[in-house]
Image (cartoon, helix red, strand yellow):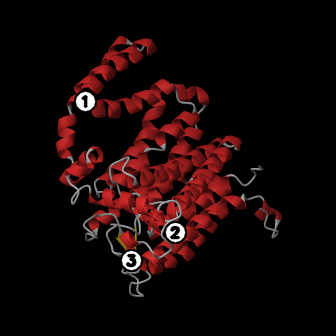
């Protein structure tokens, strides 16, 4: 798709932007269906989302034309500003029982963590792109990028916002791999999490201990280092009961009902059971736009954001869900292609980080609505209601197009 305005405009991959607009249109139609019977006010999710479209497109244009050299130069300064922005909500009154938002005295509030996800990616990309390939072979190369991601993640986790905190950390693995970090070192990053999860089952923990020992032996680290790594993982596994008890009761309930929804059908399992019912009742082609009974009788919870895909499944059917996943797949694959074709290391790392964020949101939201993973509040890009998230999504689209303007395919 070419826009005949100027040679500069024709350098941008406008088909990429078109995909985001298609998703936005589907989201707005769904939000209208959810809220068309509600009062015409700022509490109406369709009206509220509509107001954020113009600012979102404005941020898209800014990201589209920001000089890449400027983004690289001030990455660390912006990172510090981002850290401050996620700390500010702690000094403000609670909003919906959390410290996630900054209000400007308006009915609207901004969730800074949505933008800090992008800021962290840019800061890590700056650090990794400034290092030579030989430097990335050392395990010390993992420490600073990991800390860049970890610091804001811990702050956001305390707000509390587990979903955003998880998504904030996920890009670190593909970005490090893209930068040339040894797979063995990436394995060491993920090993503690596997140790904690495996410890919930004695046999799984025993097998994992054997696998971990074999991998460390074959990697031939120094004896002391290998011993420290092995016993640290074993110790973390033994801490699993403590970590489990540290979870809030509702979080424990969500995990337990994942494996047995019937244990609490009117409590922790209610959301997922209603979501599966809504999607199943829609069949292949759905009941029709504005005709969803689960949706309009309000059986389906958080339907304008976390479970909006369930609304789509009920009213427009599995065919529309498949179409949406196809569009997301095309968006993510294009992002990866842009990264592969980029001659600039910094741009490639930013692109792979943004692609990972989009993939994480789509995977978690989709898997959650059909009961494959515990319920976790993560919106669907461009479709779910949420002003801050819509702003950040279009800003990421602008960055991707900015960093891939010379891509031809």
Of residues 145 and 236, the one nearer the viewer is 236
Question: Could you say which disc has been placed on residue 104 in the image?
Answer: 3
Question: Could you say which disc has been placed on residue 27 in the image?
Answer: 2
Q: Which residue is mark 1?
A: 199
Residue at the (64%, 68%) spot, across then down: 61
| Observer able to see residue 201 | yes
Residue 194 vs 402, above or below: the answer is: above
Element class at badge 1: loop
Residue at the (51%, 49%) spot, across then down: 359
Horizontal side, residue 344 vs residue 360: left or right: right
Residue 329 vs 290, above or below: the answer is: above
Q: Of the residues tagged 2 and 3, which is closer to the observer?
A: 2
Quarter of the image holding residue 266? bottom left
Residue 212 vs 280, above or below: the answer is: above
Image quarter (top left, top right, bottom left or bottom right) of the N terminus: bottom right
Estimate the spatial distance between the alpha carbons at disc 1 and disc 2, rounded to whole Å: 41 Å
Pointers 1 and 2 in contact (C-beta within 8 Å): no
């Amino acid at each position: 798709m070419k826009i005949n305005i100027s040679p500069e405009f024709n350098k941008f991959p406008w088909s990429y932007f078109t995909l985001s607009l298609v998703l936005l249109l589907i989201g707005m139609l769904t939000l209208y269906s959810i809220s068309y019977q509600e009062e015409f006010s700022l509490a109406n999710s369709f009206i509220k989302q509509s107001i954020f479209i113009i600012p979102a497109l404005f941020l898209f244009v800014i990201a589209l034309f920001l000089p890449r050299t400027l983004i690289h130069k001030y990455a660390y300064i912006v990172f510090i500003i981002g850290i401050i922005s996620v700390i500010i909500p702690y000094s403000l009154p609670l909003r919906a029982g959390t410290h996630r938002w900054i209000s400007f005295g308006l009915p609207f509030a901004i969730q800074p963590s949505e933008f800090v996800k992008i800021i962290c990616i840019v800061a890590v990309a700056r650090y990794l792109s400034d290092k030579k390939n030989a430097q990335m072979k050392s395990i010390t190369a993992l420490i600073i990028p990991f800390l860049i991601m970890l610091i804001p993640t811990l702050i956001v986790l305390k707000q509390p916002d587990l979903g955003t905190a998880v998504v904030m950390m996920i890009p670190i693995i593909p970005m490090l791999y893209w930068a040339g970090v040894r797979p063995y070192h990436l394995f060491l990053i993920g090993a503690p999490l596997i140790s904690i999860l495996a410890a919930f089952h004695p046999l799984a923990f025993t097998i994992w201990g054997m696998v971990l020992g074999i991998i460390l032996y074959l990697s031939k680290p120094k004896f002391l280092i290998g011993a420290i790594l092995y016993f640290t993982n074993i110790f973390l596994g033994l801490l699993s009961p403590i970590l489990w008890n540290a979870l809030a009761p509702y979080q424990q309930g969500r995990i337990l009902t994942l494996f047995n929804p019937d244990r609490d059908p009117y409590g922790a399992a209610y959301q997922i059971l209603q979501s599966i019912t809504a999607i199943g009742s829609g069949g292949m082609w759905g009941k029709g736009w504005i005709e969803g009974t689960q949706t309009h009788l309000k059986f389906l919870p958080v339907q304008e954001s976390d479970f909006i895909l369930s609304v789509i499944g009920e009213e427009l059917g599995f065919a529309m869900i498949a179409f949406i996943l196809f569009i997301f797949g095309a968006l993510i694959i294009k992002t990866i292609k842009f990264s592969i074709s980029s001659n600039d290391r910094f741009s490639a790392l930013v692109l792979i980080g943004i692609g990972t964020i989009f993939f994480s949101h789509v995977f978690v939201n989709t898997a959650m609505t059909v009961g494959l993973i515990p319920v976790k509040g993560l919106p669907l890009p461009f479709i779910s209601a949420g002003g801050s998230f819509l702003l950040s999504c279009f800003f990421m689209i602008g960055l991707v197009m900015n960093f891939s303007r010379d891509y031809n395919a």
